[in-house]
Image (cartoon, grey):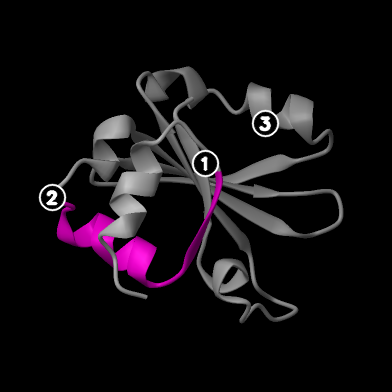
Amino acid sequence: MRAVALVGSYARGAERMASDVDLVVLSDTPGTFEDAAWFKQLRPGARLIRSEVWGPVRERRFRLASGLIVELGIAPSTWADLPLDEGTRRVLSDGHRILYDTGLLGRASATVTR
């Protein structure tokens, strides 16, 4: 894993009761995260409720036992390559907080006006 960022309403501080938690996970081997079992080990009782593909990002949406929805966007490390593509720029510009980084996401973040 190369980076993890909180994005969306929670990153902007604009979350509401019905908001989901959106995370982007960047990896050199994103296929490692294809199987939902690893997340279910972290959050017992979590149920995979949706899987989608958005270009290079594979979305995995989970409902936790508490009812909270967690959306994981699993992407290759190249998602944060400079210059940023329009989709990456839009996600980061909409609000993000870097939770873990090996430097890759920090460089991308520095190019985005918030």
The answer to whether 86 appears left or right of 33 in the picture is left
Look at the numbered disc 2 and give the secondary structure of its residue.
loop
Compared to 55, does 104 lie above or below?
A: above
Q: Which of the image's four quarters has the C terminus?
A: bottom left
The answer to whether 18 appears left or right of 45 in the picture is left
Residue 67 percent across, percent down from the top left: 80, 59
Look at the numbered disc 1 and give the secondary structure of its residue.
strand
**How many tags in the picture?**
3
The answer to whether 2 appears left or right of 78 in the picture is right
Name the residue nearer the viewer: 60 or 6: 6
Q: Does label 2 or label 3 sit earlier along the sequence?
A: 3
Residue at 32% x, 31% y is: 76
Residue at 16% x, 54% y is: 85
The quarter holding residue 14 reads bottom right
Magenta stretch in the rendered image: 83-99
Compared to 36, does 63 lie above or below?
A: below
Look at the numbered disc 3 and give the secondary structure of its residue.
helix
Taking the magenta stretch, the answer to whether it contains residue 78 is no
Label 3, residues with CA under 10 Å away: few <14, some 14-19, many ≥20 = some
Of the residues shown, which amino acid type is indicated by label 3?
Answer: Phe
Label 1, residues with CA under 10 Å away: few <14, some 14-19, many ≥20 = many
Compared to 17, does 91 lie above or below?
A: above
Residue 41 percent across, percent down from the top left: 76, 25
Residue at 73% x, 30% y is: 40
Foreground: disc 2 or disc 3: 2
Residue to which mark 3 is pinned: 39
Foreground: disc 3 or disc 1: 1
For the question of whether residue 53 can be seen, the reply is no
Residue to which mark 2 is pinned: 83
Distance CA(mark 2)–CA(mark 1): 19 Å
Compared to 4, does 27 lie above or below?
A: above
